[in-house]
Image (cartoon, rainbow, N blue to C red):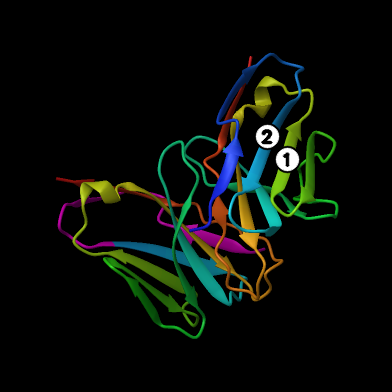
Amino acid sequence: GAVVSQHPSWVICKSGTSVKIECRSLDFQATTMFWYRQFPKQSLMLMATSNEGSKATYEQGVEKDKFLINHASLTLSTLTVTSAHPEDSSFYICSAEGQGIGNQPQHFGDGTRLSIL
Amino acid sequence: SQKIEQNSEALNIQEGKTATLTCNYTNYSPAYLQWYRQDPGRGPVFLLLIRENEKEKRKERLKVTFDTTLKQSLFHITASQPADSATYLCAPRTRYNTDKLIFGTGTRLQVFP
């Protein structure tokens, strides 16, 4: 089945550091990738949608200069949390969707737990 | 605005019983609806997809129904097992593949031996 790899799985760093999270589709080409954020005991909140070769579409309230998304190839999207602060600590999850006509399930990575000290 | 609601309270049931989880949506006309399972600290795992023209879909012990009149989907796990304990998320989606996928609040299922 379709596999999405997310790396790193866990990051602990100091306030002010920028952190890059990678999301790769291992056995299929992902035209669209989604980035989510999840706080404890809450559902996934969509942050942005990225399509290969174009700028990401951010959800309302998500700062595009804070959360930089790059989708340079059909198998890789990256999320960079710039100048991270403790309030950015959360569980970040990516998902990828293959090419095709509608009715496609999304395949998720295993998430990245980000802790900012 | 679009809204997706699932049982916010945890569902506790005894092993062997059937678990039924509800997903209601408003201001939405989904062409299909997906159900996912999420374990703590992990990403969601796709379980089932049901299209608007399908009333029911089955996969092993899982069954999903989709009522576009009631704007509701029900997710059933028959002969539930402790290993089924997880959070279950529904995600209705419109026809177009480029539309974003938005999840319901999720229902935590706990199956006791």
According to the image, label 2 marks what residue? A21
Q: Which of B20 and A107 is in front in this view?
A: A107
**Callouts 2 and 1 close, C-beta under 8 Å:** yes
> Dot 1 lies on which element?
strand
Query: Which amino acid is tagged 2?
Result: Ile
Query: Quick check: is B6 in the magenta stretch?
Result: yes
Q: Position of residue B35 (x, y in %)?
A: 45, 62
| Badge 2: chain ID | A
Q: Using the image, determine if residue B8 lies above or below residue B27.
A: above
Q: Position of residue A52 (x, y in %)?
A: 78, 55
Spatial separation of the CA atoms under disc 2 and disc 1: 6 Å
Query: Which amino acid is tagged 1?
Result: Thr
Q: Which of A54 and B14 is in front in this view?
A: A54
Tell me where the magenta segment starts and ends, as one range.
B1-19
Query: Quick check: is A84 in the magenta stretch?
Result: no
Q: Using the image, determine if residue A85 lies above or below residue A20.
A: above
According to the image, label 1 marks what residue? A78
Name the image quarter holding the C terminus of chain A: top right
Relative to B30, is A63 on the left or the right?
A: right
| Mark 1 crowdedness (10 Å alpha carbons): few <14, some 14-19, many ≥20 | many
Q: Residue at x 71, y 21 (%)?
A: A85
First in residue order: circle 2 vs circle 1: 2
